[in-house]
Image (cartoon, helix red, strand yellow):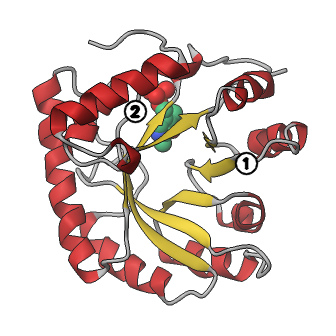
Amino acid sequence: MNRIAFTLEDLQLEIAKTCAKGKIFQENVRLIAVSKRQSAAKIRQLAAQGQSEFAENQLQEALDKMSQLTDLSVKWHFIGAIQSRKCKAIAEHFDWVQSVDREKLISKLNDARPTELSPLNVCIQLNYFDEPQKSGAKPNEVETLAKMITEMPNLKLRGLMVLPPKQTTFSNQKQQFDEINDFYQHLKQQYPKMDTLSMGMSNDFQAAILAGSTMIRVGTALFGARQDTELN
Ligand SMILES: *Cc1c(COP(=O)(O)O)cnc(C)c1O
């Protein structure tokens, strides 16, 4: 259904087209370039074309790349599984963490966030369909986590991040995303300052946007296939 790789410009056009179709303001949909297992050189290239937010899922790999890109003013999102001993480095080096899924991480991230930085933006990773192999909080755990995050001075609750099961048809993708958006809207009644529903990747971002996503995380469609070996 989707092309293998877009240029950044083509991807932005596709996002614009999708927004127009859904009568959605394009500035309400942020594009995050998922740069895991892509080189620092490729990140630099995309940043030069105007892409300003990147996401990584492995701490050490991210820190290595950040150290090569200190001259860029880009924002970094952490989207991988979080081991609690890594909270400190994540809180120090990232602008966003989208994969918070248990209580223990919340106070650790809060305590480690340097107070001279603005509060760390946090999304709760939601395992909406309760898939056993995936991380993420269960739907009935989300309220407790949300409350805890809002009580932390150095954290800012922004919303939810989801990675629903892969679906091959647009209508199945859309249906899953619609259900998740209902859940998000319900939570937002309690936490009206939330503004982020992070959903949609390379193969389903159009359906995600039409279902109310405010943040899409696109890797392979933008960078091409990921490297499985050494980065340089
Ligand atoms: C890898 C990854 C993506 C991007 O996936 P693509 O299919 O390459 O676009 C998005 N979100 C998360 C959490 C990921 O781990």
Is the C-beta separation of discs 2 and 1 under 8 Å?
no
Task: Give percent across and percent down for residue 56.
Answer: 64, 42
Residue at 40 percent of width and 57 percent of height: 136
Residue at 13 percent of width and 31 percent of height: 172
The numbered mark, 2 or 1, whose residue comes first in the sequence reads 1
Task: Give percent across and percent down for residue 98.
Answer: 51, 57
Image position of 102 with respect to 39: above or below? below
Q: Nearer the viewer, mark 2 or mark 1?
A: 2
Category of crowding for the residue at label 1, using alpha-carbon neighbours closer than 10 angstroms: few (below 14), some (14–19), many (at least 20): many
Residue at 70 percent of width and 57 percent of height: 94
Quadrant of the rendered structure where residue 62 is? top right
Residue identified by numbered label 1? 59
Classify the position of the C terminus by image quarter.
top right
Looking at the image, residue 34 sits to the left or right of residue 194; the answer is right
Q: Which residue occupies the foreground of this view, 9 or 61? A: 9
Image position of 112 with respect to 196: above or below? below
Task: Report if the beta carbon of the residue with label 1 is closer than 8 angstroms to ligand 1.
Answer: no
SS class, disc 1: helix
Task: Give percent across and percent down for residue 89.
Answer: 78, 62
Residue identified by numbered label 2? 201
SS class, disc 2: loop
Looking at the image, residue 78 sits to the left or right of residue 22; the answer is right
Task: Give percent across and percent down for residue 12.
Answer: 44, 27
Q: Can you see residue 170?
A: yes
Classify the position of the N terminus by image quarter.
top left
